[in-house]
Image (spheres, grey):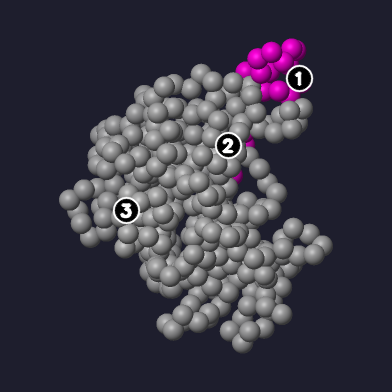
Amino acid sequence: MHTSRSLWATLALISLAPAAHTQGGGRGDGPALPDVVPGTHSQARGGWLAVDGQPAAPGRVPEGTSDEARQRFGELAGRLTSAEAVRSFALRFDVEIRTDSGSNEARKTELRYLDQDDGYVYGAFLNADGSVKQAQMRGPKPEGPTAYWQVLKDGSVLSLIGKDYSESRDELDGWAALCHDLLLIQQPARLRLMRMEARRARLATPAGVGARTLVFGEDDAVVLPDEPLVPGDRSTSIAQRAAQLVWLEIVTPDVRVWREAPGESAARRVLLGLDPALALPEFALITGRTEGPLVAPGAALMQLSDWHRYGNESADPNAATGHWLPRETRLFELREALGAERELNALAFKNRASIHLFVLPGGTLGGPPLPIESFRPAK
């Protein structure tokens, strides 16, 4: 899918470095080892540490986490996480793309993802009859973890190596990151928790900014998109809905970012806006700082709408079959803060989604992992 109007390039997310915390080891460990800093990566301990100095483990809530944060995470994990870990999917989407010039492009797209090694991904634009028009993939190769290919219209295969194809490789890395994050959002118990905090959000109207500013705590300001919650229905805005949600902040090394090369690793901060009744995430804000102000270049906002149990559309929605998945996902990219927004040190998002995904029936989510051959060109 190497085209002049790139699908992948609209999905920009951000790399961020782990934050530094007060030096110290876990309880009962004796003198702190040189690099044992709670909330960072420790070579001496062989992995990421939570803020209590203990190894960050999937679903383990660090000691000292507030009861409110524990409750929110428990409700989230209890609602979404199934007994069977989801490691792969093959899904089809209607995709709307908005370019920087303001033009729209709609395409049917097939995505496959396998959460193995650094993540393998296949993406294809489809013809009206469902056949593949053009495809790209990031998959395994015998001499190393990943390789990049493009399958052209005539079926010939192009290996995406060299400087001329660096953009295509970056796009596939971004797609792998997005697919990985979608899997983790619907399986929160798989997250290694370094720090977790309940956040309170309120709408504010700072002078010169407007009524769509969401404020966390005293001074973390986010200027949300000037968009209705449901496209075409102006009765409720994104900002109004965001202020009604309960928010949970998580620092984890498990969220991946746009253009992240295979093998890279960093801690990142994710703020999840949860429906107070259902504990389902409606927004996910990914930012480039693990501590302090939310402002960081490249932050992204995902809107996750109409959650359902994929593959169980005709059954009781409360039945424990199928895996949770949002029918619609909108991605809003960061824009430059202007005037009073800059004075507030606010995160400011574009008013229009760069990409809008509508999941279609007929795919697979979960079950036996997709075979490796799904991410290599056919011989």
Which residues make up the magenta segment?
A: 14-37
- Name the amino acid type tagged 2: Pro
Of labels 1 and 3, earlier in sequence is 1
Q: Quadrant of residue 79?
A: top left
Q: Residue at the spot x=74%, y=32% of the render?
A: 46
- Look at mark 1 in the image and give the residue it sits on: 33
- Quadrant of the image containing the N terminus: bottom right
Q: Nearer the viewer, mark 2 or mark 3?
A: 3
* 27 drawn magenta: yes
- Splitting the image into 4 quarters, where does residue 170 fall? bottom right
| Residue with the mark numbered 2 | 58
Residue at position x 74%, y 58% in the image: 145
- Circle 2/circle 3 CB separation < 8 Å: no
Main structural element of the magenta stretch: helix, strand or loop? Answer: loop
**Secondary structure at numbered mark 1:** loop
Residue type highlighted by circle 1: Leu
Residue 361: % across, % down: 40, 68
- Whether tag 1 and tag 3 are in contact, CB under 8 A, the answer is no
Q: CA distance from mark 1 to mark 2?
A: 24 Å
What number is the disc on residue 317?
A: 3
Would you say the residues marked 1 and 2 are in contact, meaning their CB atoms lie under 8 Å apart?
A: no
Q: Position of residue 281 (x, y in %)?
A: 38, 44
What's the amino acid at mark 3? Pro
Label 2 CA crowd tier, 10 Å (few <14, some 14–19, many 20+): some
The quadrant of the rendering that contains the C terminus is bottom right
Q: Identify the residue at image location x=20%, y=56%.
A: 233
